[in-house]
Amino acid sequence: MTLMREIDWESCLLEPRRDPKFERRFRRETGRSSGPVSYFSGTSWIEDATVWFNVNASKQVSIEPQLAGLVGMIVSQDNSCRFCFAETRAFLRILGMPERRISRLEQDLLAEEFDARECAALEFARRFSRSNPPPDKRDLDALRAAGYDELQIIEIASIAGFFVFFNRVTTLFALPPYAKEELPDRWVVRFFRPVIAFLMSRSDHTARLEPLEPDEQEGIFSQVVLGLDGLPFARSLRKTLDGMWASPVLTRRAKALVVAVVARTLGCPLPEKEATESLLDEGLSVEQVDGILAHLRSPLLDATEKVVVSFARETVWYEPARIQQLGRNAMQTLSREEFIELVTVASVANMICRLGIVVGAR
Amino acid sequence: MDFSGIDLAIHIGVVGFAVGLWVLLRRSRRETQRLRQRLESATGKLQNLQLAFSRFAPDEVVERVIAGGIGDIGERKEVTIIFADLVDFTALSEQVEPTVLVGILNGYFDRMSEAISQHRGYVSTFIGDGILALFGALSPNPWQGNDAVHAALAMRKALASYNRELVERNIPELSIGIGLNRGMGVAGLVGSRDLKEFAFVGRTVNVAARVQDLTRQHSADIIVTAALKESLDPCFQLRALPTTRVKGVAEPLSIYAVDGFAGADEAVG
C-alpha cells in the first residue's frame, strides 16, 4: 500500500464523453494515452491547452528530462494528486526504475541521494507549488547559486506550473487514478516493458528556443507570458489565455473574478491587477470590484458568479476529497460545460498566479 | 579417478563451507530484507506523522522542524482569534458525575471544532472548557475576519442543536461566550524543552480573552472588537456596546455584539 493510495478520492464528477477525433489528435500529438481526455473534451480552448501543455511538459529546452520528471513528481505529491502521481509512477516503472526505489522516492523525495543542484530545483518546485509563503528573490538566488541560468529557472518554474495546472484539472474532476495505479503490474505491460521503455527512450525530449512573435507579446496577463519568453510553453500559455478569454461558456467577468480571487488568496499583485482591470472593462466600478474581493459576496453577482467566486478560493490549497465534494455542489448550479470551464480557468489561474510571483521576483 | 581420504575431506570441507556461506548469506539477506521493511515502515510512519503535523502547524514550520529540529521558530503575522468559554461550567461540573461531565465536554468540543474547521479555522488549544482558535495562522487568509465571525455564528447554531440533545437527557443547557479580535502577533513553536506547541502569542490573544469575559457583562454571546469590525462584511448584524476598559489595554475598547448575518447566503464555506 503506497501513501498516495491512502488519499481519499471521490468517484469521478463527470461521465466520459467520447470524442474520437480529439482523442486521435491527443494521441498523435502527445504520444500518450487519451483515456482521461474523454472526461473533459468538448471546449476547443481546453482541448488545445491539454494537447499543448502536455507536449511542452514532455520536451525541455534547457533542463534534463529526468529533472523535469522529478519536478512533476514532487509537485504532484505536494498537491496530493493521485492521478498525476500514478501516471508518473507508471512512467518510471516502465522506464525500469525498481518498485522499491519508487516507494522510497514516494515516501521522501528529498531524502533520495540527489546532488545539490537537483535538490535546489526540487526545493524550489515544492515552494512554488505550495506558495505558503510564495517563493521570493532568495529562492531564485538559491537556484542561481546551484548553477541554474535564467532560462533554466523559468523552465523549472514552467514545468512546476504545468503540474500545478494539471494536478488541479485531474483532482478537481476526480479523474479515476485506479487504471494508472495498476498499469505497471498488468502482464501485457510487464511483458512488453523493455520494448515500451526502448521506444520511450528513443522519443525526442528536446525542444528548441521559440521567442514570442510581436503579436504574441500582448494580451491578457502578458507580463507573466513575457516573463517566460523563449520557452515553447510561453506560446502555449499565450494561446491558451487568448482562447480562455474568448470562450463564451462562462462570461469574461466570471473568468476575471476567478483569477482575481485566486490572486488575492495567494497574495499575487500582478495577475490581480490585470484581472481587476478586466473587471473594470466589464463595467464594474473600482468600489464594486473592491467590495466583491473584500468579502467574496455582493448583490451584483449572479448565481453562476457566486459559485465561481466561492469555488475559486478553494482551489488554491485543498484536500482532494473536500474540493471534490465542493465541485459536486458547484455542479448543482452550473452546467457540465460551465463546470469544466470553471475548473480549467481556476487551474490556469493557479498556474499563472504562481508564475506571476516568480516573474515578479526576478 | 581415485579419491584419497584427504581429497574427500577437502571436498567435503569445500562443500560444507559453501553450504555454510550460502546459509549465512541467506540469513544476512533475510535480515537485510527485514531491516529494510522496518526502515520503509518507519519512513512511512514518519511521512504520515508529517502529514498529521501539517494539520497543527504551517507546512514551513513542520519542514523546518524536520530539517533542523525544534529550535526557536517564530513569525510575525496578522491573525483573527476566537476565544470561547462555557458560562458557569464550574457549577455544572459540581452537579453531574465526572464521566457524564467528560462526555458533555467532549460532545461540546467536537461540535465547536467542527464549526471552526468548516470555516478554515484552526483550534490551537483547549484551555479547560475554553477554546482558542486561530484564523489565518496556517496559511494566508485575506477573508479571515469574515470566516471567524461565520465560525462563531456556526458555533452558536451548533450549541443550540447540542442543547436540545442535552435537555432530552435531562442535562442542563450549556451557554457560551465568544470573544473575537484581529491583530498582529507572533506565531511559532512555544513551550518548554519537553513540551512545545504551535501557538500565537501577543496582545491580540489577550484582548480576545478579555472580550470573551465581557460577554457575561453585556449579555451577548458573541462580541467582536473594532479592530475586527473594520474588515467585516457589512451584512453582519452588529450592535454597538458601550466602550469598556479592559485589563492590559490603555484605551477603552469599542466592542460590538454579533446578532446574525443578513446576507442571503454565506459567501464561502
Image: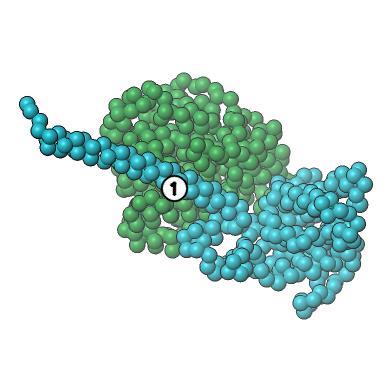
Chain colours: A green, B cyan
Q: Percent x, y for residue A7?
A: 56, 40
Q: Nearer the viewer, residue B114 or B22?
A: B22
Q: Quadrant of residue A92?
A: top left
As drawn, A82 above or below B57: above
Task: Work out whether residue A11 can be spotted.
Answer: yes
Q: Percent x, y for residue A238?
A: 45, 43
Mark 1 is surrounded, within 10 Å at the Cα level, by few (under 14), some (14 to 19) or many (20 or more) other residues, namely: few
Task: Work out whether residue A351 can be spotted.
Answer: no
As drawn, B209 above or below A224: below
In the image: residue A342, left or right of residue A237: right
Q: Quadrant of residue A250?
A: top right
Give the labeled residue for mark 1.
B39
Query: Which residue is at a point 16% across and 37% down the rendered structure image?
Result: B9
Q: Percent x, y for residue A273?
A: 56, 55
Chain of the residue where label 1 is placed in the rendered structure: B
Query: Which residue is at a point 30% across and 41% down the rendered structure image?
Result: B25
The type of residue carrying mark 1 is Leu
